[in-house]
Amino acid sequence: MEKKDLDWGNLSFGYMKTDKRFVANYKQGAWDEGVLTDDDRVIITECAGVLQYAQTCFEGLKAYTTEDGSIVTFRPDLNGQRMENSCRRLEMPVFPCDRFVDAVVKTVRANLAWVPPYGSGATLYIRPYMFGSSAVIGVKPAEEYQFRILVTPVGPYFKGGVKPIVIRVSDFDRAAPRGTGHIKAGLNYAMSLHPIMDAHRQGFAENMYLDPATRSKIEETGGANFIFITRDGTLVTPKSSSILPSITRRSLVYVAEHYLNMKVEEREVPFTELPEFVEVGLCGTAAVISPVGKIVDNGKEICVPSGMADMGPVLRKLYDTLTGIQMGRIEAPEGWITKIA
């Protein structure tokens, strides 16, 4: 199988049309078998539920070329389970997890020429998504839906290596109490666009959101979960019903406990505790771990002891171990790696 003629080492983190995508339709109460197609156009009515009432959810995962040349993906079953939860909360029909994983594998296999080679720093990003496709004018769920998967080769999230970032405490709320913060709904990300662009305009890489009820506890950034390292080497991660459960965070927690013999605490994290942590990181699919060097709270700077020069030593061990598992350099826990080719 001949690879596409791309400059793999200089890809951006952006969209590039590939050969095939997966499409399944839900009509009259059932999903069809789904097909792989070379047509990248989405054709829906002007009154589609997704356009009128934002009835859509999505997932994000990656396929990798490992050290031995295999092409794999990482824990796709957890993405499938999370999408099931998103669909239930949005009154959308569930696309079953087993079919989700099978569709991911089929879509990547149909685009093997687009999977970046090992050592390039690039990966194949996989974007499953679902939306209400039939006409809805009254406020109610659509009757028909489309589930799709597109893939696109992407470069590393951070060009030139991972460097600590500066973030701010946001005056905006990311999610409402008992709202949709715990699912991967498109509407959550639409709400986050103004706060993140406002942060960028003021020179910050990201927002730190506090809990919407009391604004006294740390939650997440809107695109990633937080992980903190204490002075005694404990990994602390915020726990809240309005945080999106990151698959990367769940994997890092396991790695910390079972590979690095670290103590782990998943609990509420008061904002007042922030100065006590010696390392701070954001974790998610795109970058795995993004170190934070400084947090600015309405002009007051909180400098993380690990500094602005490099990722802290504990976060580095976590990052190296998890990426080693993903890339096949370290033996993975059972069921974590799905081999595609």
Image (cartoon, rainbow, N blue to C red):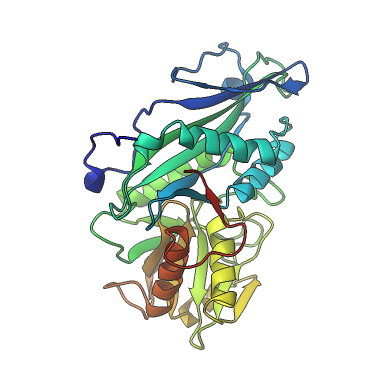
Residue drawn at point x = 51 percent, y = 69 percent: 227
Q: Work out which residue is located at the far bottom of the displayed protein and give it.
A: 232
**Residue 117 drawn at (x, y percent):** 31, 47
Q: Identify whether 52 is placed above or below 97.
A: above
Q: In front here: 89 or 268?
A: 89
**Residue 276 drawn at (x, y percent):** 49, 82
Say if residue 35 shows up in the picture: yes
Residue drawn at point x = 39 percent, y = 56 percent: 68
Q: Identify whether 102 is placed above or below 121.
A: above
**Residue 280 drawn at (x, y percent):** 44, 71
Indicate the quadrant where residue 128 lies. top right
On screen, residue 154 versus residue 140, left or right, reads left
Q: In front here: 299 or 36?
A: 36
Q: In front here: 139 or 18?
A: 18
Q: Identify whether 299 is placed above or below 4.
A: below
On screen, residue 195 versus residue 52, left or right, reads left
Quarter of the image that includes the N terminus: top left
